[in-house]
Image (cartoon, grey):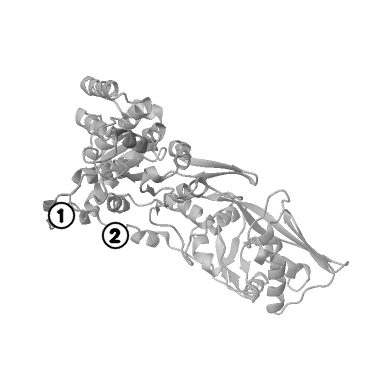
Amino acid sequence: MLSKVHAAALRGVDALPVEVEVHVGPGEERIVVVGLPDAAVRESVERVSTALTSSGYHLPPGKTTINLAPADLRKEGPSFDLAIALAWLIASQQSNGKHAEDYAIIGELALTGKIRRVKGVLSIALTAKAQGHLGILVPADNAAEAAVVDGLDVIAVNNLREATSFLEGITLITPKLVNTKVLFENQIDTEHDLNEVKGQETVKRALEIAAAGGHNLILIGPPGTGKSMLAKRLGSILPPLTLHEALEATRIHSVAGLMEPHQALVTQRPFRSPHHTASDAGLLGGSINPSPGEISLSHHGVLFLDELPEFRRRVLETMRQPLEEGHVTISRAAGTMTFPSEFMLVAAMNPTPDGKMPNESRSSPREIQNYLGRISGPLLDRIDLHVEVPTVNFRELEAQTGGESSKVIRERVVEARRLQYQRWEGVPSCNARMRPRDTQKYCKMDKSTRGLLRTAMEELALSARAYDRILKVSRTIADLAGSQTLKTEHVSEAIQYRTLDRQIWT
């Protein structure tokens, strides 16, 4: 007898529909799996057959053929176990499965018949809804994640017996419901606060501008000045994730297997901080079967690279395309995948190889130049704000307060982002993503302001990309000030954040 149930296969952060067909018929007693399965799918035969017998079912005699269609789509991972088991039971007439056609089925089976959680459930749920299915059967640990998709019945099942009984109409299971508004109530980072950082008011101002416009930022200063401490507190002043942004971030983290059991959404902006020994595959994503890397896991969040010159230059250069385009395309023998990567790059570095300021360093000018030369000009051009982090004096350290709290600063950031959302109507999402036609329309200057920018371009030998970055930062400063036009003070402040363009260290 032939049976068919619905499942899905992951491809990047998307899920593609898959039909699991099982035929049980006469012939030599063996089990064949076809449809371009990987090793984990081929091994599912052993898991599924043992789970069936452990759950009180029997293996039918004769030849069993399991087909995963379409045959030209590679099937990976153990998420097809439950679908194969249920189709096998229907084909061997041990279950009528009268509701099987209405549901997509996903889950890994333990040898006892228990259903274990799998990756990429949110993407699979979205595909199930797009395919017109009434609902989806998922492991209980994944139910909250799938339930954020409106208009889809999410049935949480704990074991094979329970899933079989539900599809036969014997057991009624109430669909899982999730209140997304409640999830977003506690999404603000309250663990880190900028008022814990003593002094560094200029740097805090730069962090506020970066957060308000989504700008990339590099912090330059000696060890112990608080560069890492400041960077880790950037998340506390970023605007809250929208539901759309949270869904995109959740899909990536789910595919990467980083969701906690019973977690529904990623509700805080991601903050990723890879070690400087990270490879280009670890940063961009890849391996044999392309998977999200650190820059994609930072989507709608922050990617913090501490000790930037210590990263291999080849690794840093791979970030140039994602920084510009907001996505990364990875080509491997297994296929080409595109992952979203709209993130804020925050980097930290010492001014010289020995960590001291240039006037105190024992390094020669050539050594300092070689040290800074590990970071290419094109990469620096893509970093909007270059900020010096000076040593904190004793009086600042002894102060009872560190200035404004993150809550106060975040209110100004949220208001500036609100102006940007109104201006762009969603595309682009912030000033840092402005297109050339947008800068021409919304970055208008009077004659004196234009003259100031022209002088800076000529005297500092700034590139065309640096000019573009100055305009975008100026627009953000103007938004924070509530100004419609770019004024001289806005542009002059933006120019000050091009430290490495001025080559003051060499």
Numbered marks: total:
2
Residue 310 makes an appearance in the image: yes
* Percent position of residue 7, x then y: 65, 58
Q: Is residue 454 above or below residue 231?
A: above
Label 1 element class: helix
Q: Is residue 236 above or below residue 86?
A: above
* Percent position of residue 472, x then y: 32, 33
* Percent position of residue 248, x then y: 47, 50
Q: Kindly indicate whether the residue at mark 2 contacts the one at mark 1 (C-beta within 8 angstroms).
A: no
Which image quadrant: the C terminus? top left
* Percent position of residue 374, x then y: 40, 38
Residue sitting farthest toward the right: 27
Residue where numbered disc 1 is placed: 397
Residue where numbered disc 2 is placed: 190
Determine the CA span between mark 1 and mark 2: 22 Å
Label 2 element class: loop
Label 2 crowd (10 A; few <14 / some 14-19 / many >=20): few
Residue 1 makes an appearance in the image: no
Tell me which amino acid carries mark 1: Leu
Which of these two is toward me, 26 or 377? Answer: 377
Mark 1 or 2, nearer chain start = 2
Q: Nearer the viewer, mark 1 or mark 2?
A: 1
Q: Is residue 450 above or below residue 207?
A: above
Tell me which amino acid carries mark 2: Thr
Which of these two is toward me, 290 or 358? Answer: 358
Residue beneath the point at 27% across and 33% down: 474
Q: Quadrant of residue 436?
A: top left
Is 194 on the left-hand or right-hand side of 278? left
Is 44 on the left-hand or right-hand side of 197? right
| Residue 424 numbered mark, or none | none
Q: Is residue 278 above or below residue 422?
A: below
